[in-house]
Amino acid sequence: MSSRQKELLELLDKSGADLYALLTRLTLREEVAEELMQELFIKLNNSRGAGNIANLNAYARRAAINLAFDWRRSQKRTVLTMGQAGEPVSTEDSPLRKLIHTEELTETLDAVGRLKKSSREVLVMRYLQQESYDNIAEQLGKTSHQVRALCSRAIRNLRNILGSNEHKSSNKEIHNVANR
């Protein structure tokens, strides 16, 4: 067994559960998270510059984030049925509430996927993984003030994207009502 494979096994033991949970949160599907987890470790094993990586855990996390959003972009928009909603996302008993929450989460994740790579990574680390600004700064090689500013801009851009989606859907509703 090569030293790289030993290092990857250590990473899997140490951070595998966290990486899997992250992929599940970003894709909203466990079976996809399993596939992406395998793809992640294959890519890490085959990467040529892995010996030069200072923090393999941070690198693997960023690679997982990118894989998840690449997968989300590759999916065609389909109508979500009750069977696809999967595990309950909220504690509400209403199936309608679960469906609405899942659709809102999907729309938000799609919007995050439209952000620049650095903004996307910072938002995921800060709000999904709930890491501190200092920890994120250390992983990205930035100061905590730069990370705060990047996070603030990312949230503003995310609001703009989500706001433009809401504006488009309300125009469609008005147009459809006017044509009746």
Image (cartoon, helix red, strand yellow):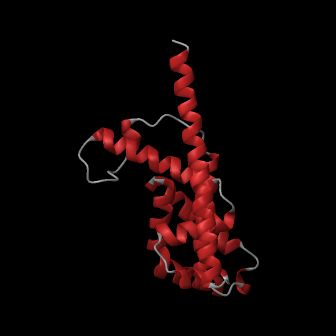
Which of the two residues, 48 or 129, is positioned nearer the viewer here? Answer: 129
- Residue 116 in the image, given as x and y percentages of width and height: 69, 61
Residue 27 in sight from this viewpoint: yes
Q: Is residue 118 above or below residue 48?
A: above
Residue at x-position 61% and y-position 51%: 160
Residue at x-position 37% and y-position 38%: 83
- Residue 99 in the image, given as x and y percentages of width and height: 37, 41
Could you tell whether 62 is left or right of 19 in the image?
right
Which of the two residues, 172 or 11, is positioned nearer the viewer here? Answer: 172
Q: Residue furthest top?
A: 180
Q: Is residue 114 above or below residue 43?
A: above
Q: Quadrant of the N terminus?
A: bottom right
Residue at x-position 70% and y-position 72%: 46
Residue 5 in sight from this viewpoint: no
Q: Is residue 22 above or below residue 104?
A: below
Residue at x-position 48% and y-position 66%: 22
Q: Residue furthest left?
A: 93
Q: Quadrant of residue 68?
A: bottom right
